[in-house]
Image: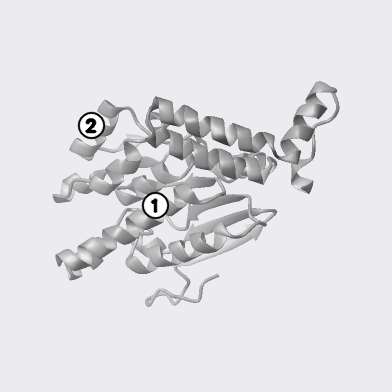
């Protein structure tokens, strides 16, 4: 738990709980709908930097307290200093944090409730996996206050088909959780009462896999998306060759061929 506090409530802005190889980072600005202030983003970045080197953690969950998952950037903070230098620094900080989610060795799951708008929708899109309560609403709503959601667009357009993404960006209209699932913004929508269990089940399923394979696979996944087809296959081939040199992989294949039990990755 970080010692930095919310000036009004004297509570940490970000909570961390580790349990069974799963780290949960909880946004804790409920009275501000967990808007991403520079301080909160700094705390998230600090934790991501720590988690990148933490071999005991196999999955990361991003969650939130209060009525909403995240309402985007803190517009009051942006309005207080709208200079190009301040706004540029804020969005550079946010972009670094979003890229760090992708570069983190561990898969990141968004546990979404209430609402995720603008940079909050970006945060959902940037996580590797996302599970939402079936009453959640999503929007890239910056257009409604005269701001095209340029940075949220980067993550959203890497999840949604083009025309669906463009409609969200141009209208700022909300979509419901069922639509978000259909578009590919989230993996699944579940009844609100089942959200915690559904996220935990998914996290456990991922945590049971070999962490080295997961880290290599995640790294390859994002590299090949940004490459052309030939480059993607080149990177995939190199990763497969590297994987096959690992004792775990050879033992797993040997066990399959010999029809023995599969290796227990969690014990390695």
| Residue found at x 68% / y 40% | 209
Q: In this orientation, which residue lies closer to the viewer: 180 or 56?
A: 56
Whole-percent x, y for residue 183 in the image:
38, 28
Would residue 144 be visible to someone looking at this image? yes
Q: Could you tell me how far apart the alpha carbons at marks 1 and 2 are, in whole angstroms?
A: 23 Å
- Where 173 sits versus 119, above or below? above
Whole-percent x, y for residue 9 in the image:
42, 74
Quadrant (top left, top right, bottom left, bottom right) of the N terminus: bottom right
Q: In this orientation, which residue lies closer to the viewer: 74 or 100?
A: 100
Q: Quadrant of residue 195?
A: top right
Would residue 194 be visible to someone looking at this image? no
Q: Secondary structure at mark 1?
A: helix
| Residue found at x 23% / y 38% | 169
Q: Quadrant of residue 80?
A: bottom left
Q: Earlier in the sequence, mark 1 or mark 2?
A: 1
Q: Quadrant of residue 251?
A: top right
Whole-percent x, y for residue 41 in the image:
39, 63
- Where 127 sits versus 91, above or below? above
Whole-percent x, y for residue 172 in the image:
22, 40
| Residue found at x 52% / y 47% | 108
Q: Which mark is residue 76?
A: none
Q: Which mark is residue 98?
A: 1
Residue under numbered circle 2: 167
Coloring scheme of the render? one colour
Relative to residue 188, is residue 167 drawn left or right?
left
Q: Please identify, in this view, whether the residue under mark 1 or under mark 2 is nearer the observer.
A: 1
Mark 2, Cα crowd under 10 Å, few <14 / some 14-19 / many 20+, is few
Label 1 with label 2: CB-CB less than 8 Å: no
């Amino acid at each position: 738990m970080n010692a930095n506090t919310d000036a009004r409530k004297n509570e940490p802005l970000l909570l961390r709980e580790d349990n069974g190889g799963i780290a949960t980072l909880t946004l804790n600005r409920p009275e501000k709908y967990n808007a991403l202030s520079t301080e909160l983003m700094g705390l998230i970045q600090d934790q991501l930097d720590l988690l990148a080197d933490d071999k005991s953690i196999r999955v990361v969950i991003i969650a939130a307290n209060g009525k909403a998952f995240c309402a985007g950037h803190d517009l009051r903070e942006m309005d207080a200093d709208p200079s190009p230098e301040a706004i540029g620094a804020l969005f550079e900080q946010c972009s670094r944090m979003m890229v760090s989610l992708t570069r983190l060795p561990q898969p990141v799951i968004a546990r979404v409730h209430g609402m995720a708008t603008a940079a909050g929708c970006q945060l959902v899109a940037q996580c590797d996996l996302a599970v939402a309560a079936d009453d959640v609403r999503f929007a890239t709503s910056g257009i409604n206050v005269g701001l095209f959601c340029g940075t949220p667009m980067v993550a959203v357009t890497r999840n949604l088909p083009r025309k669906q993404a463009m409609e969200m960006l141009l209208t700022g209209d909300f979509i419901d959780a069922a639509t978000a699932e259909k578009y590919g913004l989230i993996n699944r929508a579940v009844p609100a009462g089942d959200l915690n269990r559904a996220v935990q089940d998914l996290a456990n399923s991922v945590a049971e896999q070999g962490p080295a394979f997961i880290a290599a696979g995640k790294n390859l996944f994002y590299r090949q998306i940004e490459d052309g087809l030939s480059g993607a296959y080149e990177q995939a081939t190199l990763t497969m060759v590297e994987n096959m040199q690992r004792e775990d992989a050879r033992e797993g294949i040997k066990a399959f061929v010999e029809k023995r039990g599969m290796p227990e990755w969690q014990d390695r």
